[in-house]
Image (cartoon, helix red, strand yellow):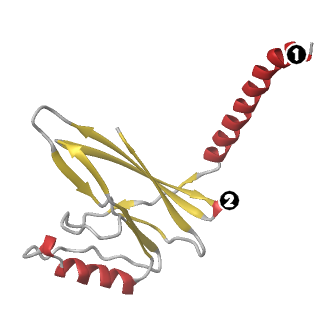
Amino acid sequence: MFLQKLCFYGPLFALAGCLLLCTTMACNKQQLIKVDGIETLEIDKCVIVTDDIVVIDDAESYLALTETAQASPQCNGINPQFPSIDFAERTLIGKLTEVTGCSAIYFKEVYADPENDAYLYEITVTVESSDGCESTLQNMNWLSVPKLPEQYTVDFEVDVR
């Protein structure tokens, strides 16, 4: 008798658990707040940093990035230009993506997660390919965002389609 009840109720408990987990995950996503005022920055494509994630919150670190980039072999003879950023009001973030194809379209969103003291930077890359087109496409996905609040971190998610 016990085994019959377990066979009947077991799948119901598993289904209830899955629904609870999915609902909890959806609620967590709904608690994110879309950050307004994000700006895509046009920094020369030769500026690819050794770390694939960049969060710069002050002028001194930004100056170090510009000096390193200007001295790098990738930018040899290019003299990359860097936009002016007011670090009292803004934070620079970037995430290296690398895909193979003819071209790529990038969609970027930033969300605040006050519960976890974090920004979430979501990058969706749609790759367009055709026969004989196997180029490696790199992009640092530079953004200027409103000043990162004290103690906040930045989490990055990349979805390639």
Residue depicted at x 29% and y 70%: 49
Please name the amino acid that badge 2 sits on: Glu
Mark 2 crowdedness (10 Å alpha carbons): few <14, some 14-19, many ≥20? few
Quadrant of the drawing holding the N terminus:
top right
Mark 1 element type: helix
Instruction: Give above or below for 43 relative to 65.
Output: above
Badge 1 density bin: few <14, some 14–19, many ≥20, Cα 10 Å: few
- Horizontal side of residue 58 vs 78, given as left or right: right
- Name of the residue lying farthest toward the left: 77
**Label 1, on which residue?**
5
Upstream in the sequence, badge 1 or badge 2?
A: 1
Give residue 65's position: percent from left, percent from top: 30, 79
Given the image, on which type of amino acid does mark 1 rest? Lys
Q: Which residue is mark 2?
A: 115
Left or right of 120? Residue 103 is left
State yes or no: discs 1 and 2 in contact (Cβ < 8 Å).
no
Image position of 136 (left or right of 4): left
Separation of disc 1 and disc 2 at Cα?
41 Å
- Residue 75 in the figure: left or right of residue 98: left
Image position of 83 with respect to 143: above or below: below
Question: Residue at point 18% right, 79% down?
Answer: 70
For the C terminus, which image quadrant?
A: top left
